[in-house]
Image (cartoon, grey):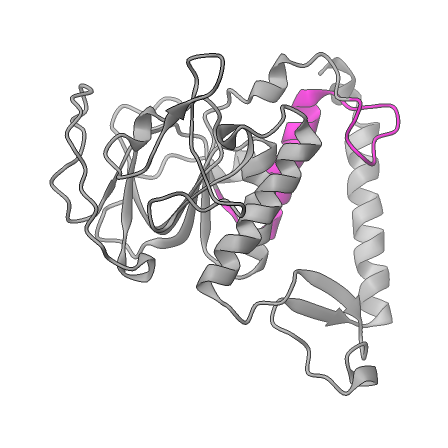
Amino acid sequence: MTPEQTTAKTTASTTESPADVAIVGGGPAGCSAGVFTARAGLETVLFEHERSSLLKSAHLENYLGFPLGIQPAQFLDLAREHATEAGCRYRREAVVNVWLEGSEERREPEGTRQAATERGEPASERTFVLETDGGVGGTEPSRYRANRLLVASWAHTDCLESLPVTREPEEPGPVMVLPTDGDGRTDCEGVYAAGRITSQHHQTIVNAGHGAHVALTLIRDDRPEYYNDWVVPEGYYARYDREVPDGVEEISIAERSRRKAKGIERMAAVFNDESVKDC
């Protein structure tokens, strides 16, 4: 499934069951995080405003696996397809406001900031409400709900004004970033941050790696028994007289061959597509 197949505008009622994770930002950090959370079985919705800072680059030449480089737009298309294939719900909508459900301290649409208060609830009992601009062609804001929030959109923190989360200017410029602990947790329970918004280096591979790191933090906060996202040969753990850990998948030789062929076919289609030469 491609992002284009999942971008139809959906107005989400706040009475719907919340997603496990909402990711704000569809660049390298956000897509990488989404691959990990979705593959771990967490219902993940990913919001992309289509203004990734990667698009400022003329050619991406230092990402492992592309010896001669790749066009940034093509790389982002593949990253978003990967996140969608992993199970993310992809939304081409900009998040404009986030608040805690049940809190009256939310920022009004015209931008009035009201103080948000820390309610002291455990993250598992919180629900975040996200309001978007409705997406391309949208006329009404859409609302979504999620139990955890992962922010991975650099220079896009205004939407967090209604949350009790610390923001500070990145030196030496005016861009606001989110301070975190060493694993991506902010000082607001249930809110995580990854990539440039935490002052990571600009390099794409660094931000993708950080997105994965923070996603694993979030997953293990939700499921402490989670081991790793790892695909191994069938019978691997039986050799060590161990149960297959949470997060690990064992596959047969036949399934391994099927996945290999499918992967080669998809990559061949991507790089043989004449249209990508004009990206």
Task: Decide if residue 264 is on the left or right side of residue 245.
Answer: right
Task: Decide if residue 191 is on the left or right side of residue 241.
Answer: left
> Residue 273's x, y, as percent?
79, 27
Q: Is residue 23 visible?
A: yes
What residue appears at the point 51 percent right and 58 percent down from the top-left corner?
219
Above or below 99: residue 156: above
Q: Is residue 132 visible?
A: no
- Between 124 and 94, the one nearer to me in the picture: 124
What is the total number of numbered labels drawn onto the structure image? 0
- Between 190 and 93, the one nearer to me in the picture: 190
What residue appears at the point 69 percent right and 69 percent down from the top-left corner?
249
Above or below 163: residue 171: above
Residue 71 lies in magenta, yes or no? yes
Q: Quadrant of the N terminus?
A: top right
What residue appears at the point 61 percent right and 46 percent down from the top-left corner?
212
- Between 150 and 255, the one nearer to me in the picture: 150
From which residue to which does the magenta span run?
Answer: 61-89
> Residue 222's x, y, as percent?
45, 62
- Between 189 and 95, the one nearer to me in the picture: 189
Task: Decide if residue 208 is on the left or right side of residue 215.
Answer: right
- In the current view of this chain or complex, which residue is farthest to the left? 104
> Residue 190's x, y, as percent?
36, 51
What residue appears at the point 19 percent right and 24 percent down from the top-left corner?
109
